Image: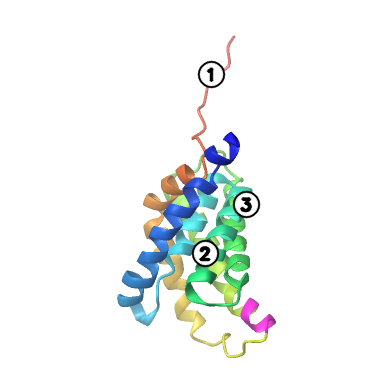
């Protein structure tokens, strides 16, 4: 019982609800280049870049299911895409032990591009046509820039949300 109360799900759900509200009201009203910025996906890739591939995939699955329930999309479609984005952002972070802020931002941008590109492919696979369009050439860079710009805020929030502590470097005793 104690591990359930101290686990990441206790922090993911309230933070996810706040970000879903921001996604549905603020991001839907202000569209750069007529693209709705997916701030929930940016939070997922921030959690992946801050916590690693497993925690990024967990955050992506939980927040994707919450997004599907709020938006009315087929259940699990966004969870699969967001989980893939969080997994990629966390996986590329493993190439360096403690990346600089700009490198972690680039990893988050890459995860956001993969997660956003997976959405039309998943929708095509479940039978919803018309999602793979040339408009993706505008959507993917906007999502990447948004994830990069928001990464200095969302990576520490994602790290806290997933219960990850920063690595501490210690000198080797002689």
Q: What main secondary structure does the magenta stretch of the protein show?
A: helix
Outermost residue to the top:
174
Q: Residues within 10 Å of mark 3 (few under 14, many from 20)?
A: many
Element type at mark 1: loop
**Cβ–Cβ under 8 Å for marks 3 and 1:** no
Element type at mark 2: helix
What residue is shown with label 2? 66
What residue is shown with label 3? 91
* Image: magenta residue range: 122-126
Q: Nearer the viewer, residue 173 or 67?
A: 67
Element type at mark 3: helix
Whole-percent x, y for residue 52 in the image: 59, 47
Q: Which comes before the other along the chain, label 2 or label 1? A: 2
Task: Compute the Cα span from label 2 to label 1.
Answer: 43 Å
What residue is shown with label 1? 171
Q: Residue at x 48, y 61 (%)?
A: 109
Q: Residue at x 42, y 47 (%)?
A: 157
Whole-percent x, y for residue 26 in the image: 31, 70
């Amino acid at each position: 019982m104690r591990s359930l109360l101290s686990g990441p799900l206790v922090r993911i759900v309230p933070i996810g609800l706040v970000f879903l509200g921001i996604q549905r009201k603020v991001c839907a009203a202000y569209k750069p280049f007529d693209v709705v910025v997916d701030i929930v996906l940016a939070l997922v890739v921030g959690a992946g870049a801050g916590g690693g591939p497993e925690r990024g995939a967990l955050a992506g699955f939980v927040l994707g299911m919450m997004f599907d329930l709020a938006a009315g999309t087929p259940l699990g479609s966004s969870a699969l895409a967001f989980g893939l984005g969080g997994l990629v952002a966390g996986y590329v972070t493993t190439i360096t032990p403690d990346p600089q802020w700009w490198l972690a931002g680039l990893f988050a941008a890459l995860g956001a591009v993969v997660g956003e590109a997976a959405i039309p492919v998943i929708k095509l696979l479940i039978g919803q046509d018309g999602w793979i369009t040339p408009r993706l050439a505008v959507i993917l860079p906007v999502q990447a820039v948004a994830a990069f710009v928001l990464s200095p805020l969302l990576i520490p929030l994602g790290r806290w949300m997933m219960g990850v502590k920063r690595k501490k470097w210690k000198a080797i005793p002689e």
